[in-house]
Image (cartoon, rainbow, N blue to C red):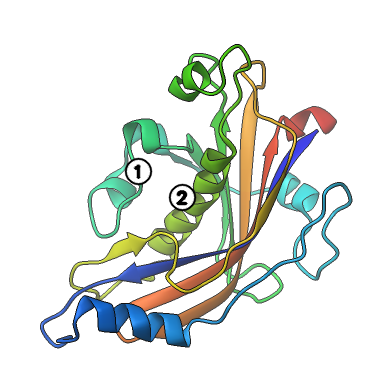
Amino acid sequence: RSRAQHRPRARHVNHATDADDREPGERRANVRDRAQRVEAQLDLGARVQSAHTDPAEAHAAPSDYFVDLTAHPDHFFVRGPRIGTDQLLLLDALTGYWPDAGAAGLGRMRGRKKVDPGAWYFKAHFFQDPVQPGSLGVDALVQLLECFCIERGLADGMAAPRFQSPAIGVEQRWKYRGQVQPTSKEVQADIEVTRVEREAGSVLVVAEASLWVDRSEEH
């Protein structure tokens, strides 16, 4: 069993409007001043002891929600804020969405990716010891949070929304345990949103998240 746990991750959905006449540096300073510093206590073996959904429970939770991201549906790739494509598409599918779930009642989402032993990153990382870069696991969690923001409609009404990664002024911490290798079969990502804050011209979204490889073999 391998796990990379990341808690929390924050995202901004920003937009520029005619009414917002502040310079970019002023906007960044404003966000930095108002955003809370978020830290998390992560484990390296035992599960995180918190009030949030256990990763095993999140993995097994039933859901009728399913989106094939490899089909590039317009909802996630064309209209409004968009997620990455091609080599930057780090999830194959969204396999669960609970808009009011979680300890804070702000929602959860689950995604997955089938491991391709011929993936581009295995050829470059590392020589004679191919593993998926840990940073791509973190990016997959961010992408899942982006999908949540889109599905939840958090950018609705914004003139030209885009994702800011990471959220400016918000500390992030993560730790790794195990590896995703060419012989691995499937990666699953889970996020639980813990905070949503609307500011002038932006929305800050914070979540707890975990990434598992071949978790299904345990059940």
Tag 2 residue: 143
Identify the element where label 2 is drawn.
Answer: helix
Q: Is residue 154 left or right of residue 134?
A: left
**Residue 201 visible in image:** no
Residue 25: quadrant of the picture: bottom left
> What amino acid type is highlighted by mark number 2?
Gln
Q: Residue at x 35, y 68 (%)?
A: 13
Image: 90 above or below 37: above
Figure quadrant of residue 211: top right
Look at 33% across and 49% down and name the residue there: 76
Task: Give the crowd class for mark 2: few <14, some 14-19, many >=20 residues within 10 Å.
Answer: many
Quickly name the residue at label 1: 84
Q: Position of residue 56 (x, y in %)?
A: 79, 48
x and y percent of residue 173 in the render?
64, 60
Quadrant the C terminus occupies: top right
Identity of the residue drawn at 82% across and 59% down: 48
Q: Are the residues flagged by discs 1 and 2 in contact, CB closer than 8 Å? A: yes
Q: Is residue 73 above or below residue 192?
A: above
Task: Decide if residue 22 is in sight here.
Answer: yes
Q: What secondary structure is marked by label 1?
A: loop
Q: Quadrant of the N terminus?
A: top right
